[in-house]
Amino acid sequence: METKLNSELYLQFKRNVAILRQYAFPLLILAIILYYVWGYYKEWSLNSINRNEKTKKLIDEEKRQAYLKMQESLLKKSTEMKSEKKPVEKVEPTPEKKSVCYRLPTAVPGSSQFGSSNIRGMDDIKKRSNFSGPDRGMAGG
């Protein structure tokens, strides 16, 4: 029985090897193609990163040049103004306005704006309440 099992395993192994031999060349070609595609992709991504860095440097250089031109134009304006030496007009000081000071309300504690007390006793609250039932004690009402 062992020999029969071994012979079956051997036959299965031979079939698997035959299948691998049948597809070995196409798989090798496919692996080579994938390797080159992956290499091109890595090269493309590195180039795009380098391009972005170069563009960023160019933009920074353009901004720096524009800033330098603006500084030069401001320097020219200031030297022209100094060379003209226009008489400085005196500005008369305007009288200062007094700041408006608002009075804070001075309310006496326990009184409302109508003069009557705004602190009520429990009896007063019970009388004015809309509740007409029996007195409920501390529960209010």
Image (cartoon, grey):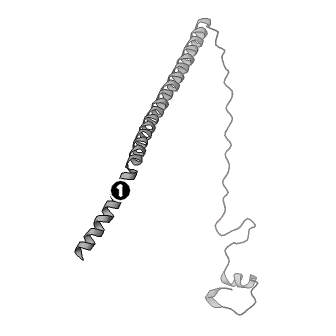
Horizontal side, residue 90 vs residue 71: left or right: right
Magenta residues span 107-120
Query: Foreground residue, 131 or 21?
Result: 21
Residue marked by disc 1: 18
Query: Foreground residue, 71 or 37?
Result: 37
Q: Is 119 contained in the magenta span?
A: yes
Estimate the x, y position of residue 42 in percent, counting from the top left: 42, 38
Question: Where is 62 relative to 41, above or below?
Answer: above
Say which quadrant the C terminus sits in: bottom right
Q: Dividing the picture into quarters, in which one does residue 100 lie? A: top right
Q: Is 108 contained in the magenta span?
A: yes
Amino acid beneath label 1:
Ala
Q: Dividing the picture into quarters, in which one does residue 4 lie? A: bottom left
Estimate the x, y position of residue 24 in percent, counting from the top left: 37, 49
In this view, the residue farthest toward the left is 2
In this view, the residue farthest toward the bottom is 134
Question: Where is 99 relative to 73, above or below?
Answer: below
